[in-house]
Amino acid sequence: MRRIKIMRSKTILLLGIFVCTLGLTQTFAQQPSNIRLEEFKLLKAPATHGLLLKQGDRLAICGDSITEQKMYSRLMEDYLTVCEPKLDVTVRQYGWSGERAPGFLARMTNDCLHFKPTIATTCYGMNDHEYRAYEDQIGQTYRQSSTAIIEAFKANGVRVIQGSPGCVGKVPGWTKHTNDTLMDLNLNLARLRDIDIDIAKKENVRFADVFWPMLSAGVAAQKEFDPQYAIAGKDGVHPGWAGHTIMAYAFLKAMGLNGDIGRFSVDVKKGKMTVSAGHTLVSAQDGEFKITSARYPFCACAPEGQSAASFPVCENDNPAKDNSIRSGMALVPFNEDLNRLTLKATHVKAGGRYKVTWGSESKTFAAEQLKRGINLAAEFPCNPFCAAFAKVDAAVAAKQAYETKQIKQAFRSPEAKTDMEGVADRTEKERAPLAAAIRAAFVPVTHTIKIAAE
């Protein structure tokens, strides 16, 4: 299996560029796509405190066609299934192409509350902004409907994460307001983002900032990788894997997850290892440690022939492209915040170098790096968990595809008009084995780590 490498200096430069974009007064010369970040005077996003998720939560992921792409929702369900299995969270996605906040408000009782969610994420505003410059009526309609959605959820005991809309990468071809510029559209979306923050504060719910990380990361990627890098997708609205990764990051962070997947501590001199909860040391011999893990790191690619429904293939993945999950993970601190599988070594020789082999991949690290700890999930994107992760992802993709069919077809069928409960019961029986397949696919992985002095 070939591993695609990014030079450390290039990674540092990229992360440095991204950090700079977080300053609202930062000016970029020769702005890609004519995005002038210094013109966005945004409200400060509220801080996240504590874990919002509870054991056995039923998560509803609600949104428009971007949600119906079943990409960020799929990444979220993958993550919650394999990275946080003890929480036992189940997921449904409710994406509907072309939908605005008032549209979801009108259907949420029938389509969403029917299944008794305990927590929900919303991601509207893209269609609500009407692909034109901001007007007060746009903001008022969006505020009223978004507030009503939250209040309806709260009345049914549902905790809410109010997500902002994302950004646009170009004026889409379907807009009728041809005189409005890309900046006009994004400034409109920025206003809706700030309305979301105000609503979240007043309603005492969580907020997920999708807009600013996507916009600023997209500018950074166009400067670092390619002027044609499209964080919001080739049509300017529907993101590829990189953009959806940033969206998933925003919602997972808003949930208050700490990202500590596991810790492996090795005493090189004694040849011993201790492991954290969720992992079991099977054997240790001659610097080689066999571990069985009931908790996975998040995997950004799958081995060739094992990926499903466009998921990136490790052998072909290019982290400089907007269709790469690894690319999105580099543009925000995904691995640092949400995906830490740490290997730390003691009694290493000062100034020495050590070869770490994990599965079929090897990489050399300085002794000081191992003493501080390395993040295996970040250093080895193609790793022993990827094949098992791919099976879970394929099952998640199949279930979420059925959920679109269930809501958009079965629940709108002639039969549903006369026997909605019957349709709901029948389709739930069809969905049940798809949900069970996810749990069946998630099995412990046995893997080997070897540390050898060079």
Image (cartoon, rainbow, N blue to C red):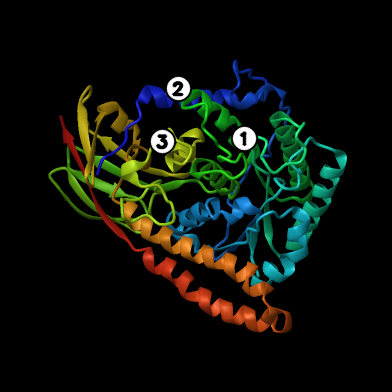
**Which label's residue is closer to the chain start, 2 or 3?**
2
Residue behind mark 2: 13
Q: Helix or strand or loop: what does disc 2 sit on?
A: helix
| Location of the N terminus (image quadrant) | top left
For badge 2, the amino acid type reads Leu
Residue 26, placed above or below residue 71: above
Q: In this rendering, does residue 278 appear at all?
A: no
- Categorize mark 2 by other alpha carbons within 10 Å: few (<14), some (14-19), many (20+): some
Q: Residue at x 45, y 37 (%)?
A: 327
Q: Which residue is mark 3?
A: 319
Amino acid type shown at disc 1: Gly
Q: CA–CA distance between discs 2 and 1? A: 23 Å
Q: Position of residue 342 (x, y in %)?
A: 35, 41
Q: Which tag, 2 or 1, sits closer to the chain's start?
A: 2
Residue farthest toward the left in the current orientation of the protein? 286
The answer to which quarter of the image holds residue 362 is: top left
Q: Report x, y in % for residue 209.
A: 64, 41
Is residue 190 rendered to the left or right of residue 339? right
Question: Mark 3 is on which residue type?
Answer: Pro
Rendered position, 378 above or below 304 = above
Residue 357 vs residue 344, the one in the foreground:
357
Location of residue 208 (image quadrant): top right
What residue is drawn where x is 43% and y is 32%?
A: 320
Residue 119 is situated, as x and y percent measured from the top left of the image, at 64, 60
Q: Which quarter of the rendered picture does the C terminus lie within?
A: top left
Would you name the residue on which mark 1 appears? Answer: 169
Q: Nearer the viewer, residue 248 or 83?
A: 248
Q: Would residue 136 appear left or right of 267 to someone viewing this image?
A: right
Lower sequence index among marks 1 and 3: 1
Q: Position of residue 295 (x, y in %)?
A: 38, 56
Query: Cα distance, mark 2 to mark 3?
Result: 14 Å
Q: Is residue 440 visible?
A: yes
